[in-house]
Image (cartoon, rainbow, N blue to C red):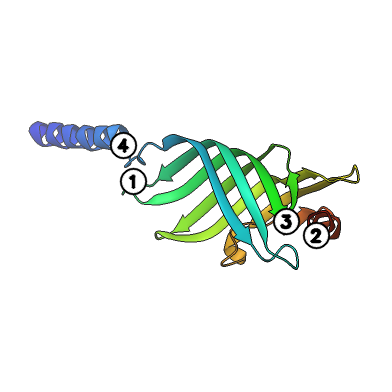
Amino acid sequence: MRRFRLLVLLSLLALSATGVLAHPAAAIEPTRVPIDDTATFEVTDICSFPVTINATFVGTETTFYDQSGEVTRIQIHNVEQDVFSANGQTLTGLPFTFNIRVLFVDGEVTHVYASGLVERVPLPDGTVFLSAGRLDFAAHPGSDFRIVPDVGRSGDVAAFCAALAG
């Protein structure tokens, strides 16, 4: 009988030690890469005429994974400066900082939130086009560039376009 109790006691100790010492599966360490890039593209949904944008980006991109290696989130901290041109006119924006958060569910993008300054551009009349707030690019399929936030404050788009109209 004494051996049985000892065996039960040792078994219980082994089970409790396993429970205490067992570690849940940990997520894979995030990866972080620097961003230093430029892009040139044309947009047709800001003004009634096409606008060419030369953009410069500097920042960091951090990708987060779950325990199976699936991407769960990408976070970007960025400083951007844009140069807008149309009709022989050019507007050079001031550098602005913002964050982007890309969320995934089962490997599919569900939201692409950008928050912070959206754009900051001195206009020829001495005013500054300034937009700030939050955008969800996933809510605007096919739109790679926006100057008006979904939530927040928009600059005077009419004045911006008038400055580029020539």
Q: Are marks 2 and 1 in contact (CB under 8 Å)?
A: no
**What residue is drawn where x is 40% and y is 59%?**
107
Instruction: Name the image quarter holding the N terminus.
Output: top left
**Amino acid under disc 4:** His
Mark 4, residue position:
23
Question: Which of disc 1 and disc 4 is earlier in sequence?
Answer: 4
Identify the residue at the far front of this view: 88
Q: Position of residue 3 (x, y in %)?
A: 8, 32
Give the secondary structure at mark 3: loop
Labels 3 and 1: the sequence-earlier one: 1
Residue type highlighted by circle 2: Ala
Where in the figure is residue 120, as x and y percent of width and height? 76, 43
Q: Secondary structure at mark 2?
A: helix
Q: Earlier in the sequence, mark 3 or mark 2?
A: 3
Is the residue 86 above or below the residue 119 in the image?
below
Q: Residue at x 75, y 46 (%)?
A: 91
Q: CA distance from mark 3 to mark 1?
A: 34 Å
Location of mark 1 (residue): 67
In the drawing, what numbered circle is on residue 165?
A: 2
Q: Which mark is residue 149?
A: 3
